[in-house]
Image (spheres, coloured by chain):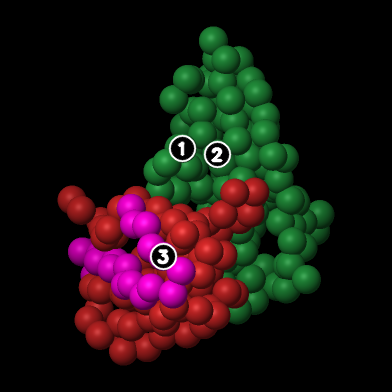
Chain colours: A red, B green
Amino acid sequence: NAGVTQTPKFRVLKTGQSMTLLCAQDMNHEYMYWYRQDPGMGLRLIHYSVGEGTTAKGEVPDGYNVSRLKKQNFLLGLESAAPSQTSVYFCASSAGGEISQPQHFGDGTRLSIL
Amino acid sequence: GQNIDQPTEMTATEGAIVQINCTYQTSGFNGLFWYQQHAGEAPTFLSYNVLDGLEEKGRFSSFLSRSKGYSYLLLKELQMKDSASYLCAVLDSNYQLIWGAGTKLIIKP
């Protein structure tokens, strides 16, 4: 009954370092999303994918890259970490098809850039 | 631009009723979602409205008026476990969710 699993849960990086956040879902969902959540702001979409092998930019894509090589996995990469990327990152998935399908979220990755 | 407005924080008493409002201005409208998010946890789905009116689901109800760009979430018989943030999100013309900043609900005994 895992749903959406994010790894790692916490990470501290130094400015300029790179890293990859992993998201895995076991619900056979077509759509996957990466968001960031900052205090006082709504969730902001970084990148999303509507199927295996496809990705698209969201509202705040700069400084991030993604890949969806397998349907169940969606990876978020930080190429050269900056303090402005300190945030809580959430991955979500949805079944697609009907627009009323809700998004299911992972528990988040808390990332600090020093 | 696109905008979702919700009160930042509300306080209510255990056993009472509270109404959390959400107003929106978006490019197109394909439905409105409400999510609950406990501190340090993931958002979880509560409701979806696309037609005007009230949708009831147990202690929680959600209302939509598309002409007014307005929705509310009504929580009845409040319990301490309802202390959380409540997020309003609108599905825009590009089928992307635009999120409000959330309303932190504090329940007092």
> To which residue does mark 1 refer?
B39
Please check whether the numbered discs 2 and 3 fall on a single chain.
no
Say which mark, if any, is on residue B65.
none
> To which residue does mark 3 refer?
A14
The magenta segment is: A10-28
The residue at the point 27 percent across, 58 percent down is: A8
Residue B57 is a magenta residue: no
Say which mark, if any, is on residue B85.
2
The earlier-in-sequence mark between 2 and 1 is 1
Q: Residues within 10 Å of mark 1 (few under 14, many from 20)?
A: few
What amino acid is labelled 3 in the image? Lys
For this rendering, which residue is in front, A64 or B80? A64
What amino acid is labelled 1 in the image? Ala
Q: Is residue A36 above or below residue A73?
A: above
Q: Is residue B103 above or below residue A21?
A: above
Residue A80 location, quadrant: bottom left
Which secondary structure, mark 1? loop
Residue A78 location (% of width, % of height): 41, 75
Q: Is residue A38 visible?
A: yes
Judge depth for marks 3 and 1 and give the one in front. Answer: 3
